[in-house]
Amino acid sequence: MNKSFQLASMAAGLILLATSCTQPKTTEAPVQVPHIIESSNIVGLWQQIQVKDSIDDETGITMTAQTPRSRYKCIMPDGTYFLLNVQRDEHSQIATKVLHYGTYTIQGDTMQVEHIESCADVPALNGHESFVRYNMPDVNTITLYYKFGVETGSPGSSEWNQELWKRVTMIAQ
């Protein structure tokens, strides 16, 4: 019984030694990255907003309406993104489709360069870049201008296109 206890003690000691050798010793606290839903920068889940101006015939006053679209963009902290559309099909079933996805880099304070891996709507964009200039008037709003890095003649290739996006936030309870 004494030998069994010694063997068990030695095994436990070896396990502790092996564990302490493989675990890095650090006194620094791990860097806490906020969850994507708690982000206050460009990382997040965004819903596209359609902006439409109309002029009142009687007063001449321009009125602006902002209507949420069924298009969402998810910008992940690991440098990837995807754009998806949610709509109903002919049988009133919800059909969610990824429109395109890829990677991105931030260049400077207001430029994001997206490398489009795959684009279902416009296959000519596969492997190309999209240049996105953005402004965040507040943490839950992005006004952006994008232009695709492809030959003239493709949608979005020759002019900057404006879009408005609102952050998808948690429902207050």
Image: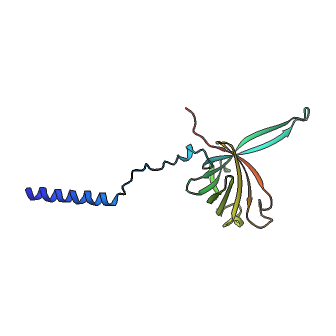
Q: For the view shown, which residue lies furthest in the front direction?
A: 27
Expressed as whole percent of the image width and height from the top left, the position of residue 153 reads 80, 65
Examine the rendered structure and indicate whether residue 121 appears above or below residue 45: below
Expressed as whole percent of the image width and height from the top left, the position of residue 67 reads 73, 41
| Residue at 77% across, 67% down | 151
| Depth order, front residue of 67/62 | 62
Examine the rendered structure and indicate whether residue 125 appears above or below residue 166: below
Examine the rendered structure and indicate whether residue 110 appears above or below residue 155: above
> Is 30 left or right of 113, judged from the image as shown?
left
| Depth order, front residue of 18/43 | 18
| Residue at 57% across, 39% down | 170
| Residue at 73% across, 64% down | 149
| Residue at 72% across, 54% down | 133
Expressed as whole percent of the image width and height from the top left, the position of residue 47 reads 66, 46
The image quadrant that residue 119 belongs to is bottom right
| Depth order, front residue of 88/8 | 8
> Is 149 left or right of 26, judged from the image as shown?
right
The image quadrant that residue 146 belongs to is bottom right
Quadrant in which the C terminus appears: top right
Expressed as whole percent of the image width and height from the top left, the position of residue 106 reads 64, 56
